[in-house]
Image (cartoon, rainbow, N blue to C red):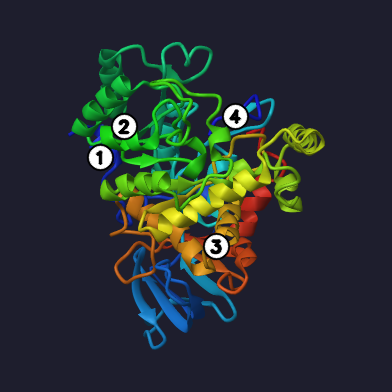
Amino acid sequence: MRRALTPVVSLALLAAGTVSAQRPARLGPQVTNFVAVDAPAIAITNVRVIDGMGTAPREGQTVVIQNGKIAAVGAGAAVPAGARTVDGSGKTLMPGMVGLHDHSYYTTSGRVVQSNFTAPLLYLASGVTTVRTTGANNPYAELNLKRSIERGDFPGPRLFITGPYLTGPGQGLGSTMVGLNSEDEARRIVAYWAAEGVSWLKFYTGVSRAAMKAAIDEGHKHGLKFTGHLCSVPYREAVALGIDAIEHGLFANSDYDKTRKPDECSPNMMQSFIGLDVKSPEVTATFKDMIAKNVALTSTLVVYELFVANRPPLEQRVLDAMSPDARTEYLTSRARIAETNSGIPLDVFKTGMAYELAFARAGGLLGSGVDPTGNGGALFGYGNQRNVELLVEAGFTPVEAIQVATSNGAKALGIFGETGSIAVGKNADLVLIAGNPAAQISDIKKVELVFRDGIGFDSAKMIAAVRGLVGAR
């Protein structure tokens, strides 16, 4: 979603390759300042484990980390001699979240801010250990941030960089989007960004079918994958053209808009969701096509909730993280939506929730992300946590919602062999929570430690570092 000013064998193969744990040769002071636990062997003892696979929590477990990997998991797991121990009594250990729609920039109703300081810190502090940026405002800023994190110069999640938005002719003017005018231009631009090192590209609302097909064919030659915030191309047509993933659940799908014209984004798309039956033959056909081609769907309920009157519940921690101007802009926009009833009707929002649950129940691969755009109320990391809460409101059990946000995301990125669940041999990307989100999903916000490749970061310290800066840095 990009609603900044209204409410309404190439380098790519290297970028998208293995994510095996690999500690940088050195950790710079900006990293070590936030490290709370760092040792060759670490044992988290007597902890509740939610493994990220949708299974019931296991109590009284010991999880051993050695050289950045999970070495043992179990009630009777042996603690290596000399290991640093962390007492997990009364706490929960879950996999690090995999954010599938986690921009490095932030918007309110009046600003767009590239956030290479606050974004990586707040994502990591909130338990997000892997991010796909899913549409770049400044691709080179993101590529530089990725390299900085990999060198050990700055803390942050593992990054999968998405290049600039690809949209329709003339629609990229005045922004950082690329308005594709021809199939040849689509191929040229895709090849360029593949060489620059991005691993994904994202289509936007005005792209044509011909440009989409040309871009996908070219990108797949270079190992790139494609997702989209669609409208001009319905989901079923995009799947037929070879798209790898789709964003925003129901809310960008023109499959059900009877007024749409080919290659045009109809202003009536949102109206087509009113009264939509998620068990209808039309919806079932969409799901069938996506599942047959293993096309993942990303839930970003959290950013659409911002346009439902009097939602979400105001949280002081969210307001505290914002810069003064960003806070004012968000609260003003929120009040205007409530006063004018000009946002998304609650029943349409609930239909979007039901759509995602139905997709998952049908066997579709549903992931999760925050999309920190819209009117500014969905923050890096905090919004990832809120999206998990919304999945539970939609009808997922807490452990199923956590699965969507962890292992499902890893599967969508093709890295499930290395991360996304708690299993021996995987990277130690873990979140220690002072509570039990399986019993009370809001406890997912009570993050104490976040392990990224076995290095444990102090969540509270990172949150303190960004206080009052989201929307400024």
Q: How far apart are marks 2 and 4 (CA)?
A: 27 Å
Q: Distance between the residues labelled 1 and 2?
A: 8 Å
Q: Earlier in the sequence, mark 2 or mark 3?
A: 2
**Which of the pair 95/393 is nearer the observer?**
393
Describe the element under mark 4 as helix, strand or loop.
loop
The residue mark sitting in front, 3 or 4, is 3
Three-letter residue code for mark 3: Gly
Q: Is residue 227 above or below residue 442?
A: above
Three-letter residue code for mark 1: Leu
Q: Mark 4 points at which residue?
A: 3
Q: In this view, does 317 lie above or below 198?
A: below
Q: How far apart are marks 3 and 4 (CA)?
A: 28 Å
Q: Earlier in the sequence, mark 3 or mark 4?
A: 4
Please tell me how crowded label 4 is: few (under 14), some (14-19), or many (20+) other residues with Cα within 10 Å. some
Q: How far apart are marks 1 and 3 (CA)?
A: 39 Å
Q: Name the residue under label 2.
A: 197
In this view, which residue lies farthest toward the bottom? 76
Three-letter residue code for mark 2: Gly
Three-letter residue code for mark 4: Arg
Check if mark 1's residue and mark 2's residue have beta carbons within 8 Å: yes
Left or right for 40, reference 192: right
**Which of the pair 75/66 is nearer the observer?**
75
Check if mark 1's residue and mark 3's residue have beta carbons within 8 Å: no
Left or right for 178, reference 464: left
Please tell me how crowded label 3 is: few (under 14), some (14-19), or many (20+) other residues with Cα within 10 Å. some
Q: Name the residue under label 1.
A: 14
The residue mark sitting in front, 1 or 3, is 3
Q: Name the residue under label 3.
A: 395
Identified at 37% across, 78% down, the residue is: 73
Q: Name the spot of residue 146 as percent of width and height, x first.
A: 41, 39
